[in-house]
């Protein structure tokens, strides 16, 4: 992707990650998404949590919301594709943990810079058995970017397993990148590359 598109994708991907937690299992998917967007933006725009000194507190609170209903395991599984089937349970657990860290450190700071300027329109939802798609549009100056959230309710709570941003799925985007690394090298090389990237991001890189 061009650099601008990469930056846009990263920003919108984090927006998606911050719209996933839901306290009420009986709520409709669109209600779940809207409620948590409001909660997260409320935290990020709260003067009590403003400034560098409150960064860890802001991120801790938003991470708590995200972690409750963001299905990192399902997303990691879909992102790895067929390679997932060849992993041991321990390898899967390690990869899911690393994948979750990658998402957190990649996107945590980006949404904070734009939180005050976001306007989100909810344009509908579709339901089929235990699956749903919630359609929204992020409105920015001179731009409207569609974001669709794909959720499942197999466990009794609506959780996200993919996000489609302007027609590009987050899972398919990662799957393409991961497959390239694995085919050119190995799964272990992918893990090492992701771990190095997480360490860079953790250090502020």
Image (spheres, rainbow, N blue to C red):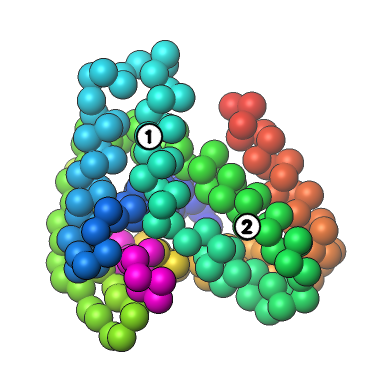
Say what secondary structure mark 1 lies in: helix
Say what secondary structure mark 2 lies in: helix
Q: Residue at coordinates 70% horizontally, 63% vertically from top-left?
A: 92
Classify mark 1: residues with Cα within 10 Å, few (<14), some (14-19) or many (20+): some
Nearer-N-terminus badge (1/2): 1
Q: Residue at coordinates 53% horizontally, 68% vertically from top-left?
A: 74
- Nearer to the camera, 116 or 129: 129
Q: Residue at coordinates 69% horizontally, 35% vertically from top-left?
A: 199
Q: Position of residue 76 (x, y in %)?
A: 58, 63
Relative placement, left or right, of 28 versus 66 is left
The image quarter containing residue 124 is: bottom left
Specify whether residue 158 is painted magenta: yes
Q: Position of residue 98 (x, y in %)?
A: 65, 50
- The residues bearing labels 1 and 2 have C-alpha atoms spaced at a distance of 21 Å
Residue, disc 2: 96
Relative height, residue 39 to residue 29 (above, below): above
Relative height, residue 169 to residue 70 (above, below): below
Relative height, residue 150 to residue 63 (above, below): below
Q: Residue at coordinates 61% horizontally, 34% vertically from top-left?
A: 201
Relative placement, left or right, of 6 versus 66 is right
Q: Which residues are magenta?
A: 145-159
Q: Position of residue 19 (x, y in %)?
A: 31, 52
Residue, disc 1: 61
Query: What mark, if any, has residue 23 been given in the picture?
Result: none
Q: Position of residue 102 (x, y in %)?
A: 59, 47
**Is residue 111 something one can see in this rendering?**
yes
Specify whether residue 36 is painted magenta: no
């Amino acid at each position: 992707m061009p650099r601008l598109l990469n930056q846009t994708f990263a920003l919108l991907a984090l927006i998606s990650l911050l719209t996933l937690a839901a306290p009420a299992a009986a709520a409709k998917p669109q209600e779940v998404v809207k409620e948590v967007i409001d909660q997260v933006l409320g935290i990020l725009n709260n003067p009590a949590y403003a400034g560098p000194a409150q960064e860890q507190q802001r991120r801790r609170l938003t991470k708590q919301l995200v972690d409750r209903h963001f299905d990192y395991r399902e997303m990691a599984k879909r992102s790895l594709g067929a390679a997932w089937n060849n992993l041991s349970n321990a390898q899967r657990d390690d990869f899911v943990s690393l994948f979750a860290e990658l998402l957190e450190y990649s996107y945590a700071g980006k949404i904070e810079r734009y939180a005050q300027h976001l306007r989100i329109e909810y344009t509908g939802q579709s339901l089929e058995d235990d699956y749903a798609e919630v359609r929204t549009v992020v409105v920015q100056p001179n731009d409207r970017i569609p974001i669709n959230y794909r959720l499942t309710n197999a466990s009794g709570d609506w959780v996200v397993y993919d996000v489609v941003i302007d027609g590009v799925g987050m899972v398919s985007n990662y799957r393409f990148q991961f497959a390239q690394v694995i085919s050119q090298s190995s799964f272990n090389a992918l893990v090492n590359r992701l771990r190095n990237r997480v360490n860079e991001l953790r250090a502020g890189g």
